[in-house]
Image: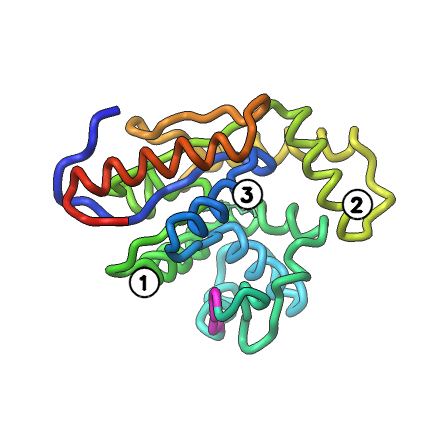
Amino acid sequence: MPVPHKPFDKVIAIDGPSGSGKSTIAKELARSLNVLYIDTGAMFRALAYEASEKKIVLKEGPALAEFLNSLKIDYGESDSVLIRINGHDLSEKIREHHVSGLASVISQLPSVRKYLLDFQRSLALDKICVMEGRDIGTVVFPDSFCKFFVTASVDIRAERRLKQLRENGDDKITLNQIAEDVRLRDETDMNRSVAPLKKADDAITLDTSALNMNDIIHILSNEVKFRAAHLGFNL
Ligand code: DC
């Protein structure tokens, strides 16, 4: 793959649909490179959760603007606290199944995307980090020096999600329901008018359906290091 020319951002962008394995990859890659890991999906989830607690209607308007103005987000404070909103630790709550649907709705609102875009850029300012999401390589950091687009089949993604939910104590939802949710969410994420889920032209695609995670991390880590060295910084 061609290495980009300067100017570039020292952000490793990892995009892809939910359940593709991108979170595991992003987390492990950040750990193996010893750099900051930033999960932007957690931010949309946290805003969606908080808005629903405050009974904010998820549409553009003065109530949403006031809600956004009232927010204070703390991200990545420690290994155990991923995200706080206005001082409340939402790290666990954002993983509840109903929050996925709310996050998908709130992520379509331009003012929310703009708010989080600024926040995401400010977090990564002058830092080397792995940032995962849907639009990192296309919108948030289009000049990222290394972009990956992670995919997997709907069935595999639904199975992974089911395992995760079972581990979190949800024993009601069925595999079929999840597969349907996954399909629906893909469609919404890919067809929204602002910052849709899309592979950047210069991103490397990885289908994780049949790949071993350790192999993937090894390949990606080598690719990142190679590019970094070529651009004159070390990882
Ligand atoms: O990755 P996730 O499933 O935690 O993301 C939750 C929702 O947020 C999902 O519907 C897509 C949306 N999202 C987004 O629109 N842009 C991002 N950069 C990250 C997530």
Q: Which amino acid lies under the numbered mark 3 shown in the image of this protein?
A: Thr
Q: Of tags 3 and 2, which is closer to the observer?
A: 3
Q: Which amino acid lies under the numbered mark 2 shown in the image of this protein?
A: Arg
Marks 1 and 3, the one that precedes in the sequence? 3
SS assignment at label 3: helix
Which residues, given as a range, are shown in magenta? 71-76
SS assignment at label 2: helix
Q: Is residue 212 visible?
A: yes
Give the CA separation, mark 3 to mark 2. 17 Å
Circle 1 residue: 122
| Left-right relation of 65 to 224 | right
User: Can you tell which quarter of the image residue 173 is in?
Assistant: top right
User: Can you tell which quarter of the image residue 18 is in?
Assistant: top right
Circle 3 residue: 24
In magenta segment, residue 80: no
Vertical side of 170 occupied by 213: above or below:
above
Q: Of tags 2 and 1, which is closer to the observer?
A: 2
Give the CA separation, mark 1 to mark 3. 24 Å
Q: Which amino acid lies under the numbered mark 1 shown in the image of this protein?
A: Ser
In magenta segment, residue 74: yes
| Left-right relation of 185 to 129 | right
